[in-house]
Image (spheres, helix red, strand yellow):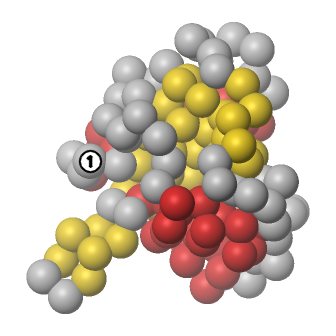
Amino acid sequence: MLAVMSDLSSTDGLDPEDRKILTLARSARARNAVPEGAAVRDETGRTYVAGSVALPSLQLSALRTAVAMAVASGAKSLEAAAVVADAEQVPDEDLATVRDLGGPATPVLLAGPDGTLRATVTAG
């Protein structure tokens, strides 16, 4: 179930670390010319950035790719996640992936392509 924590129209009130992962997610989307960009921050403050993957044999959202990169690099938990996309909400499958590593209270920031924060939800 999607639990909305807040709806904001800008990133002005965000913690600088959350603003950073939103910026990284937006940069990944633009740099790679992909539909989605994502970034996650692990329990040590390290960040992992990814774009969506669209191969004939492998389809992954940007958020699932970023979480997989964190796991593959030894992350034990997540502090926060961010995704930049045209979508109006974070898919349940993506939230489940964040929840698997970070737990149900992990915040997931969703922003539009222009970087405007649309919502902050929990992975829960």
Res 51 → quadrant: bottom left
Between 52 and 27, the one lying in front of the other is 52
In the image, what residue occupies the spot 52% across and 60% down?
A: 92
Q: Which residue is mark 1?
A: 35
Q: Residue at x 74, y 74 (%)?
A: 101
Q: Is residue 15 above or below residue 37?
A: above
Q: Nearer the viewer, residue 1 or 57?
A: 1
Residue at left 50%, top 48%?
A: 90
Can residue 28 be seen?
no
Q: Position of residue 69 (x, y in %)?
A: 56, 75
* Residue drawn where x is 71% and y is 75% of the image: 100
Residue type at mark 1: give it. Pro
Q: Furthest-left residue in view? A: 56
Q: Specify whether residue 84 is in view.
A: yes
As rendered, which of 30 and 79 lies closer to the eye? 79
Total numbered circles: 1
Where residue 46 appears, x then y in whole percent?
74, 60
Q: Where residue 117 appears, x then y in whole percent?
A: 55, 24
Quarter holding residue 110? top right
Helix, strand or loop at mark 1 = loop
Give the quarter of the figure containing the C terminus: bottom right
Q: Residue furthest front?
A: 1
Reply above or below: 16 against 13. Answer: below
Instruction: Quadrant for the N terminus, please.
Output: bottom right
Q: Mark 1 Cα within 10 Å, few/some/many (few <14, many 20+)?
A: some
Q: Is residue 75 left or right of residue 2?
A: right
- Please indicate whether residue 21 sits to the left or right of residue 104 in the image: left
Image location (x, y in percent) of residue 60: 35, 71
